[in-house]
Amino acid sequence: MTKTETIVENYHGTDVADPFRWLEKPETLEVRTWIDEKNEATQNYLAAYPKREEVREKLTKSWNYPKYSVPQKEGDYYYIHKNNGLQNQAIFYRTTDLALDEFEVIIDPNTLNEEGTAAITNLAFTKDGNRLAYGVSLNGSDWQEIRIRNLQTGKDESDVIKWCKFSSIAWNEEGSGFYYNRFPEPGTVDSEDESNYNRVYWHTVGTVQEEDILTYEDNENKELSFNPMLSDDYRYLILSVWKGTENKSRIYYRDEQADAGFVHLLADDDGEYTFIGNEGKLFYFITNYDAPKEKIIAVHLDKPEKEHWVDIISEQEDVLTFAKIINEQFVVCYLHNAHYKLSIYDLEGQLQKEVSLPNYISLSGVTGKKTASTMFIGYTSYLVPTTIARYDFEKDELDTVFNTSELFEAEGFETTQVFYPSKDGTRIPMFLTHRKGLELTGDNPVLLNGYGGFNVSLTPAFSPSQRMWIEAGGVFAVANLRGGGEFGEEWYKAGTLGHKQNVFDDFIAAAEWLIEQNYTSSKKLAIMGGSNGGLLVATCISQRPDLYGAALCLVPVTDMLRYHKFTVGRYWVTDYGNAETNPEHFEFMYKYSPLHNVKKGIEYPPTLVTTADTDDRVVPWHATKFAATLQAVQQGSNPILLRVEKNAGHGLGKPTVKIIEEQTDMYSFLFKTLEIEI
């Protein structure tokens, strides 16, 4: 039994106990020892599953196929990430001819450390393609160092830029230096402010970071962050200004040819603005201002007032998710019922072409220069790994460049989409992927996934693990809950703050619908979610423990009263609220906070809670405190297990060997607890 302490805090007149707060100190020997004991118990439970090695072998085989990123053209070369199959990290290559499949290694992150946990997280080329600034993250951390690779010599310059997180890199036209944003050097501010006071600097190649020139700061608004970029003509330095995960932003700019400061172009905090290009003083933005499903507007720097804005592409029925200017045209991606479609408009906003792509896909990327006559498109589905295609604007032709779909037979499987009613009658879409001819016996194993937050949309994507699940006769279900971005701003806001219960109701309704329609039964229904989706799973097993046969609660947020005090938790206040300072927020947050709604005398479903010891996004104590709380009150024999990955973070850059090991444990847990034959 895990030890408890008598710690009580008063929130707006309500006493709240926190008996496992000592687990918030993972650096102590006591906590490390406790974690080791819990990991050992989890591994002992999984070791008793006789087909665990078979699961590992199936996953390893399924993972062993080549994976390509979407190529980008820089100078005379095409650059691409490629993983041959089981490499821990994809290698960054270049080639002059993609058809030859003969690549020159530019950066191999597998050689940067022995554990294979070094990941390339940021790339920015100079205009001439002779230099590359790139970010390196270790152990899944959000923190990164920026280095510079000379692409003529193949060697790194001496420059190293530190203290970067969620940073942008904007080279000048000559390639002699770049603007970037970073946080303060640790120790120069209070520890709680090390993710505040974001600043923009100028770095000249060949100099040390201490000589970088401070370009912009706003110490009066310490929670603002600034991402620099340069306009298409390199004349204007543009700052995208944001605060946490709030679906709003500002735009500041500075004329690099004038001796003047920054102009606050769009600074009313009335919407989100994303710069996509310019023609001289005419700037193009994607915005949700007066357009919940987003639109493209043009703003002239000489007449920036709203009455002079021009709608180039008006708000549509579908959600505009991103746009680029390629071939002097707008390439626009729309989200239609949680799957993607791609359209081409001229710069006046007239529709020119709908790019013909398969149904129920996600776009993994679109690349191309403003003046290029071709673009590269990456797309994937629940049944097919990422396909890379090249689109020729002049010929209106789409040709496949890299395709591994033949490695996974798709004919015997299918993805369909259904709409089901939530508690309040709202229609919620859900994808179902399974073998063709599935019989609705009420006894099929179903794995239900969800997220529902931060304007993030769950769209179709291939996974070797999910492939193994459907090959074993399972159904993989994805519910597109409110709080996501599937249907625009109103859909997103319907799952935030005091409306957060809608998200849980949507997920619970999905489970109930799957049972009512005879897809499955409670004993064969598993739920899964990570990060904010981990919060979803944790809340749903606390609200409806009777509804599920198993739960995968992955890197979860579980303590809604204290989450904002650690790492980047403060960014999430616009989605969740702040129970410490706001009595109204406390009322609705305390009502669903998973950690505070676990009750004695209840049999919770078999649950595997996961985290990582160096997760600096969702700190691991959310998982450890929640697992300890469940274990302390569990009624009955259902296992409550905790898995803590060592030397890993929230998921960023996780090496293949760790992914396969984690997925082996997750699916062994499901197969064992749900009694599924593979």
Image (cartoon, rainbow, N blue to C red):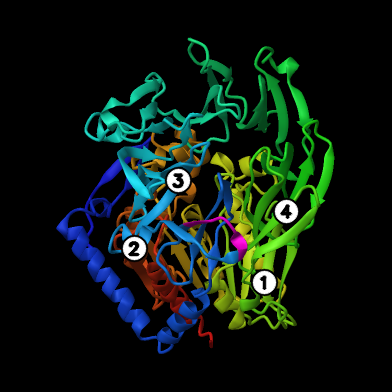
Q: Name the residue under label 2.
A: 116
Q: Name the residue under label 4.
A: 391
Pointer 4 local density, CA inside 10 Å: few below 14, some 14–19, many at least 20: some
The image shows residue 623 at horizontal and vertical percentages of: 36, 58
User: Of residues 506 and 325, which is closer to you in this image?
Assistant: 325
Q: Residue at image x 66%, y 27%?
A: 278
**Which is more foreground, mark 1 or mark 2?**
2
User: Dot 1: what SS?
Assistant: strand
Q: Is residue 577 magenta?
A: no
Contact between marks 2 and 3 (CB within 8 A): the answer is no
Report the amino acid beneath label 4: Tyr
Report the amino acid beneath label 1: Thr
Q: Residue at image x 62%, y 40%?
A: 493
The image shows residue 277 at horizontal and vertical percentages of: 64, 31
**Which is more foreground, mark 4 or mark 2?**
4
- In space, the residues marked 4 and 1 are separated at their CA atoms by 29 Å
**Which is more foreground, mark 4 or mark 1?**
4
User: Dot 3: what SS?
Assistant: strand
Can residue 317 be seen? Answer: yes
**Looking at the picture, does residue 526 appear above or below residue 539?**
below
State which quarter of the image contains the N terminus: bottom left
Q: Name the residue under label 3.
A: 122
Q: Mark 1 points at which residue?
A: 433
Contact between marks 4 and 2 (CB within 8 A): the answer is no
First to last magenta residue range: 93-99
The image shows residue 130 at horizontal and vertical percentages of: 46, 41
User: Counting residues from the N terminus, which is met first, the one under dot 4 or under dot 1?
Assistant: 4
